[in-house]
Amino acid sequence: MSFVSVSNVWKKYNNRSIIERVNVDILEGEFISIVGASGCGKSTFLRMLLAEETPSRGEIRIDGGAPAKEPNQERGVVFQKYSVFPHLSVRENLIAGEGFVTPFGKLFGTKRRVAVARADEMLERIGLNHVADQFPAALSGGMQQRLAIGQAMSARPRILLLDEPFGALDPGTRIQMHDFLMELRDETNMTVFMVTHDLQEGFKLGDRVLVFDKPRWDPHDPGMYGATITYDFDARDGGIPFQMKEETDVSE
Amino acid sequence: MRLINHIPNRAGGLFLAALPFIAVLIAYSVASDIRLSANPQDKLLPAPSTILSTAERLFTEPDRRSKDILLWKDTFASLARLVGGVSISAAISLALGLAIGLFPYARSFMSGFVSVLSMVPPLALLPILFIVFGLGETSKVVLIVIGITPFMTRDLSQRVLDIPREQIVKAQTLGASSLVIAWRVALPQILPRLISNIRLSLGSAWLFLIAAEAVASNVGLGYRIFLVRRYLAMDVILTYVIWITALAFVIDWLLKTLSRKSFPWMEAGL
């Protein structure tokens, strides 16, 4: 039934609670937007989904599997920046998505030829075939993020995690990236988690919008209680009950 | 306009760059002239023309006894020691730097030790090296290795730690093992740093080389300088000093060019 299950997850650093009592079940193919004020633990939650950090209590399972202790191939990730390898050309970055699994991290012979063909296919799809042999530093911010998404997808993850992927892009590029991401998602029906601080972006792209906030607040000790999911909106079909006039709002 | 906004044009920049060299040359010529006019036998500041003719002799005329051109023999001996020592240091510091930077266990185990080791004054160890490794080539190479490896290791391990966490996590989500991350993610990114590191360490490497050669050797640039010092042969010493400077400059330039040619992705980021 539920594809990703998060049950009673807490995260504490020393004695400061960051996140407490998070329970949520995600279906396969859902696009989850995670929003909230800064410092409310949404990035911590994403890092736990990524298994870069483990919960202090509770567990996160993908498809009923054992809770992961370190990042693995089930999870694809795109960060705001530094997501691609600066020393590899655009094409090599995509091939790395397949080649890093091997003992030497490199493909040879027929396998490499197949991977190159697949990488070129992906380059076509993400619209970067004209810069295949350039290095990421020569690419614009939007192109770098497209490459990062393509690279994450080429490793065929079960879930795709996006940590403010469009935060550093200008508004026009951001809207192009939205279209690109939605197209890619329609093709692959990938389960996606996206952390964003842009509410409209969250509602526009997401099927569900999870809001992180602190339900309890101790004025004498603000670090006492952690944040949890305070709202779980259904954002499908234009976000009923939330109505968004997309064309006018987003272009602001 | 503020001083920080005054920029020399191309010709002016070249002139300014040449000025200190010309100034030193003129100052030396004048000083040498004053001393030589007071006492033509003075050996302390030989005339530039004397240095030039000495240099010509040193570079072309073989030694009467051994039939070798000593300057070239010294050069090859010294360069072999230098290249040997620096290469060994580079290899060790690369391996240690990667291990310390990537593996928390190696970091706990090694980084404190390397920090303390880098505080040991290498020249103070020279007598021990001569006792342990004898007066041959080994002790000289080992002095260079001991002298520059800890510093290079510290810098390279810091550079590995500076690789954005995001990249390391990303590599893990692509299924890379620790060794693949070291080999395919970290190593290529610190190689340019290794070269700039070698460039910085070469100054110290020369220092240790010449010190070791001065104390005990029978061939080498440093050995020759300290040998002819006994006869106050300033023209020979100055020729050797200028020659060593030229060698150091050429090696530095070669490394810089190699770095630029080998790592095009660095340039794209500039």
Image: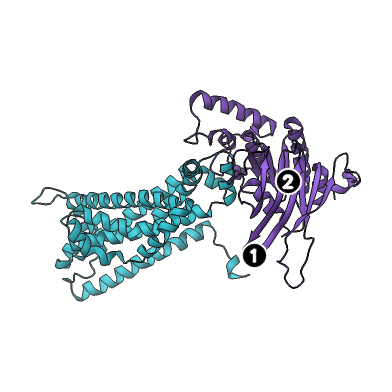
Chain colours: A purple, B cyan
Considering the numbered disc 2 on the image, is that residue within a helix, a strand or a loop? strand
Q: Nearer the viewer, mark 1 or mark 2?
A: 1
- Residue B170 lies, in percent from the top left, at 59, 44
Residue farthest toward the bottom in the current orientation of the protein = B38
Subunit of mark 2?
A: A
* Residue carrying label 2: A194
Q: Is residue B99 above or below residue A119?
A: below
Q: Residues within 10 Å of mark 1 (few under 14, many from 20)?
A: few
Q: Quadrant of residue B230?
A: bottom left
Residue B21 visible to the viewer:
yes
Q: Nearer the viewer, residue B119 or A17?
A: A17
Residue B49 in the image, given as x and y percentages of width and height? 24, 61
**Of callouts 1 and 2, the N-terminal one:** 1
Quadrant assignment for the N terminus of chain B? bottom right
Task: State the separation of the CA atoms marked 1 and 2.
Answer: 28 Å
Q: Which mark is residue A15?
A: 1
Q: Residue at x 40, y 50 (%)?
A: B94
Are discs 1 and 2 located on one and the same chain?
Answer: yes
Q: Nearer the viewer, residue B39 or A190?
A: A190
Image location (x, y in percent) of residue A218: 76, 69
Nearer to me, A77 or B152: A77
Q: Which mark is residue A158?
A: none
The residue shown at (64%, 49%) is: A81
Q: Is residue B14 above or below residue B186?
A: below
